[in-house]
Image (cartoon, rainbow, N blue to C red):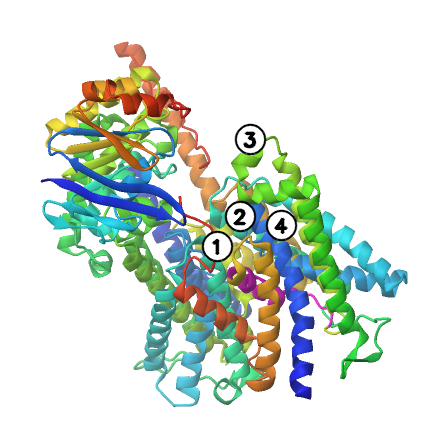
């Protein structure tokens, strides 16, 4: 029972990170129909910037995260402007390749600046606490709380503000949004900004329990793709739910199946989903 | 006619150059790099058939490359199978795996296909990495034998290995050329252009995509098997996504969906990387943006730029001939002919 | 009975796009389907050509139930179609675009391709001849070697017709053949459609250009909100009160 509780809590932590990353990915997909392969690189940049702010500049964890969110958000905007905007009418194979180009560039850049070594991010919240009979580190509690908070804020923004509503409108109907006078360019940039920001939060939160290194985004982004296919490409609740489902299946799988192959769970899940439904679960579509 | 002659001369010249190359350089290191780039080219041609001519971007090709390499490695090292038999079996096995994966993967389209294959590639990598008992895991597989002798010919020297790989490369190009310039190739391209349209033309898209996919994986497997026999040591890294990205860069920079793109791109990048060795792992600082730049401005790579230039020149020539004829005959030009012949990007 | 739909229905979620449509395409005639935007015309085509499985009902072609056949098999039976957007490959020549249209009547395999067998040579020539033949028919012989990208919208439409004809169809479904084409050229396309019928190909088309339809069609069906509200000769349709109401009832003709 103790083990199960511990694993469930682990699942909650990992799931929170996954959800944040998948949210950014699904938002961009919803608006621009781009599977942004470079999203993992944004995540990685987020980890490094927080790391640098803390170790080199020496600011507090939270301030470091804030700077990271802003910088990676702007990086996302830059990416949209320079790469994806010019490709908006190109055949679908093109934006995927361009995204891969960006991914390769950012990883090389990170390696150039920070080196290929694994870095550990110091956290002011390393202490162990007792939560409902479970012994957990405060950082893990923080991950869950901060992630849920971020999701709630995002939800409020999307539902309660005009700008947020225009993002939703555009993801539902691009031409329609354009017709009713929504500045689709601005919305696209904003979406990339949010997407980058979410990736930065996710990376900064998870870095203390994982590590920071140039390839840290690889697995996360792959899993985020699985999640948004699971939850429906472009669906916001789907991304959150999918993130937690994967988080739980992995932490339980690691304990009860095989720790070696826990990373494979996501992909097996995907293979099964797409085998049964090639257009993904909850595909929006039809003419 | 002159164009045909022209092309034939170029091809003959290139083959002649490739044959004479090792005798000219006499530098073992240069020959080694060249042999490696030939191996990559075979993989890139495979990827080109699928991504370039059939329109399906597979991100699993490093995985199939690794499957070919490990099949050969395990068959020769563990099972003691003769190299040549192992080479055939490796291709066969990769093809069968490709068939099984293709059956499922090709039901998906566009983004889903790319993501799906990305994940398949990762699963293959992970299995190789984690299945210690079979593959040796992170330690890799060592002591893969060089190709065994065929009669008096041995494949121990770097020159003989070079020719062996060159032979397979030429065979690959020959196959791909024949396929692309056939009704089957036209069928693939019709699918790339528009799958819906292809269906209404009575083309069984699933069957054709599967043929293209399986062939494509067989070439990737062949490249992997040759790599294993050439380098004699393989680790799980050859199945990692970065290898797929490398293949993709070679293809894109050379020219996706062109016959000569894989050669141009691979040679250029492999040799450029040699000169940029001081960049080492940072070479992607250059190639990453280059990839994005090309796909935005020149989606058909270097070969595409060249073809565009040739087409423009021809169009200009054609137009001036037309104008001359017009002056002579004073015939009214039909509305279309004067229309701008410049290539318009597909929109 | 040539081609017939019986109670053909298609639902997308809760939306009924096509509702219990009974329709007969008459052989050797020009059949037309009109209706306001969103009336389900294109969906109706998609049901017949096998792109969407119908929710209910049947499609019968020359006495054979083809309701659940996949699109490629339907094409092989002799039912061709065009799309609103031509879907041609812009960077390729007109001839290269059209050659593949006859592929379904050939049987060359990968083996034939690699070893350049006699069958492949024969069938390649057969496809090329067919393409030249249909290009001649639609009046694009001179443009055969030009890139599609350099063609006018009208010429692209002709190329799309040629591609459909290259499949040796008995009936062709044309989805808005004159959309985006100026009025003078529309007459030319109408002429071409008549010529197709004279050649023995039955035509069924969707069109918004009323004048063109009324002059061209032998028989018209009107769809509104997925339901058939009228069927008859152009004269009957023009005087049908339901039709007039549907068109004046807020859904202007595009």
Circle 4 SS class: helix
- Chain of the residue displaying label 2: A
Q: Are marks 3 and 1 in contact (CB under 8 Å)?
A: no
Q: Are marks 2 and 1 in contact (CB under 8 Å)?
A: yes
Circle 2 SS class: loop
Q: Which mark is residue A33?
A: 2
Which of the image's four quarters has the N terminus of chain A?
bottom right
Label 3 vs label 2: CA separation? 19 Å
Q: Which residue is mark 4?
A: B289
Q: Quadrant of residue C27?
A: top left
x, y percent for residue A285: 44, 49
Disc 2 packing (10 Å; few <14; some 14–19; many ≥20): some
Q: Which residue is mark 1?
A: B111
Q: Are marks 3 and 4 in contact (CB under 8 Å)?
A: no
- Magenta-colored span: A211-229
Q: Which residue is mark 3?
A: A179
Q: Earlier in the sequence, mark 3 or mark 2?
A: 2
Are tags 3 and 1 found on a single chain?
Answer: no
Disc nearest the viewer among 3 and 2: 3
Q: Which mark is residue C64?
A: none
Label 2 vs label 1: CA separation? 9 Å
Magenta-drawn stretch contains B313: no
- Chain of the residue displaying label 4: B
Q: Quadrant of residue A202?
A: bottom right
- Chain of the residue displaying label 3: A
User: Horizontal placement of B46 versus B328: left or right?
Assistant: right
């Amino acid at each position: 029972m103790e083990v199960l509780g511990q694993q469930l809590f682990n699942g909650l932590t990992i799931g929170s990170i996954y959800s944040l990353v998948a949210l950014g990915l699904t938002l961009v997909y919803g608006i621009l129909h781009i599977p942004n392969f470079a999203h993992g690189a944004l995540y990685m940049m987020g980890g490094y910037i927080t790391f640098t702010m803390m170790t080199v500049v020496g600011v507090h964890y939270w301030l470091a995260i804030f700077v990271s969110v802003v910088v990676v958000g702007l990086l996302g905007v830059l990416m949209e402007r320079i790469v994806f905007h010019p490709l908006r009418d190109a055949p679908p194979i093109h934006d995927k390749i361009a995204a891969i180009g960006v991914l390769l560039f950012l990883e090389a850049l990170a390696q150039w600046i920070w080196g290929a070594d694994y870095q550990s991010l110091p956290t002011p919240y390393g202490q162990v606490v007792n939560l409902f009979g479970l012994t957990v580190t405060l950082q893990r509690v923080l991950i869950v709380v901060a992630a849920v908070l971020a999701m709630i804020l995002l939800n409020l923004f999307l539902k309660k503000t005009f700008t947020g509503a225009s993002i939703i409108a555009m993801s539902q109907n691009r031409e329609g949004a354009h017709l009713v006078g929504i500045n689709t360019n601005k919305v696209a940039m904003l979406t990339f900004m949010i997407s980058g920001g979410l990736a930065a939060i996710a990376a900064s939160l998870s870095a203390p329990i994982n590590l920071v290194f140039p390839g840290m985004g690889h697995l996360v982004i792959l899993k985020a793709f699985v999640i948004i296919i699971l939850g429906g490409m472009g669906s916001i609740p789907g991304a959150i739910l999918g993130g937690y489902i994967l988080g739980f299946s992995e932490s339980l799988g690691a304990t009860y199946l095989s720790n070696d192959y826990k990373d494979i769970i996501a992909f097996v899940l995907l293979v099964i989903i797409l085998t049964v439904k090639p257009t993904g679960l909850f595909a929006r579509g039809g003419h | 006619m002159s164009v045909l002659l022209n092309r034939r001369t170029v091809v003959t010249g290139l083959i002649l150059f490739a044959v004479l190359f090792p005798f000219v350089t006499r530098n073992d290191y240069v020959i080694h790099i060249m042999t490696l780039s030939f191996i990559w080219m075979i993989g890139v041609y495979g990827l080109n058939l699928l991504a370039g001519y059939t329109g399906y971007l597979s991100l699993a090709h490093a995985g199939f490359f690794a499957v070919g390499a490990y099949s050969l490695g395990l068959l020769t090292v563990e099972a003691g199978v003769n190299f040549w038999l192992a080479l055939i079996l490796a291709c066969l096995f990769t093809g069968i795996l490709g068939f099984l994966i293709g059956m499922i993967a090709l039901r998906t389209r566009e983004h889903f296909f790319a993501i799906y294959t990305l994940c398949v590639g990762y699963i293959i990598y992970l299995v190789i990495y984690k299945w210690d008992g079979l593959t040796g895991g992170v330690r890799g597989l060592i002591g893969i034998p060089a190709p065994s002798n065929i009669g008096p010919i041995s494949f121990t020297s770097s020159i003989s290995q070079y020719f062996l790989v060159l032979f397979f490369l030429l065979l690959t190009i020959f196959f791909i050329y024949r396929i692309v310039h056939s009704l089957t190739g036209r069928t693939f391209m019709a699918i790339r252009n528009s799958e819906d349209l292809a269906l209404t033309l009575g083309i069984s898209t699933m069957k054709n995509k599967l043929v293209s996919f399986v062939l494509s994986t067989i070439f990737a497997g062949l490249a992997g098997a040759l790599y294993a026999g050439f380098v004699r040591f393989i680790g799980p890294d050859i199945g990692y996504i970065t290898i797929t990205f490398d293949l993709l860069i070679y293809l894109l920079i050379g020219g996706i969906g062109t016959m000569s793109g894989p050669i141009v791109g691979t040679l250029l990048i492999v040799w450029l990387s040699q000169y940029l060795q001081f960049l080492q792992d940072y070479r992607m600082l250059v190639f990453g943006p280059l990839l994005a730049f090309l796909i935005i401005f020149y989606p058909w790579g270097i070969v595409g730029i060249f073809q565009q230039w040739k087409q423009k020149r021809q169009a200009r020539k054609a137009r001036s001939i037309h104008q001359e004829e017009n002056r002579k005959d004073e015939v009214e030009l039909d509305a279309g002919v004067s229309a701008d012949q410049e290539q318009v990007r597909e929109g | 009975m040539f081609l017939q739909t019986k109670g053909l229905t298609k639902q997308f979620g809760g939306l009924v796009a096509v509702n219990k449509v009974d329709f007969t395409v008459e052989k050797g005639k020009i059949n037309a389907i009109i209706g306001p935007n969103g009336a389900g015309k294109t969906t109706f085509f998609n049901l017949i050509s096998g792109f969407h499985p119908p929710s209910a009902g049947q499609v019968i072609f020359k006495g054979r139930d083809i309701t659940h056949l996949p699109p490629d098999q339907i094409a092989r039976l002799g039912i061709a179609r065009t799309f609103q957007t031509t879907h041609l490959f812009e960077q390729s020549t007109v001839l290269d675009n059209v050659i593949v249209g006859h592929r379904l009547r050939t049987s060359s395999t990968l083996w034939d391709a690699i070893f350049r067998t006699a069958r492949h040579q024969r069938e390649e020539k057969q496809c090329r001849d067919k393409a030249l033949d249909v290009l001649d028919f639609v009046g694009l012989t001179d443009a055969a070697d030009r890139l599609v990208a350099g063609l006018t919208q009208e010429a692209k439409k002709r190329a799309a017709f040629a591609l459909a004809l290259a499949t040796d169809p008995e009936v062709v479904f044309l989805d808005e053949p004159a959309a985006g084409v100026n009025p003078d050229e529309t007459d030319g396309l109408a002429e071409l459609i008549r010529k197709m019928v004279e050649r023995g190909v039955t035509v069924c088309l969707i069109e918004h250009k009323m004048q063109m339809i009324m002059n061209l069609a032998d028989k018209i069906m009107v769809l509104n909100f997925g339901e058939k509200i009228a069927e008859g000769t152009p004269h009957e349709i023009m005087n049908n009160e339901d039709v007039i109401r549907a068109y004046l009832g807020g859904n202007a003709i595009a």
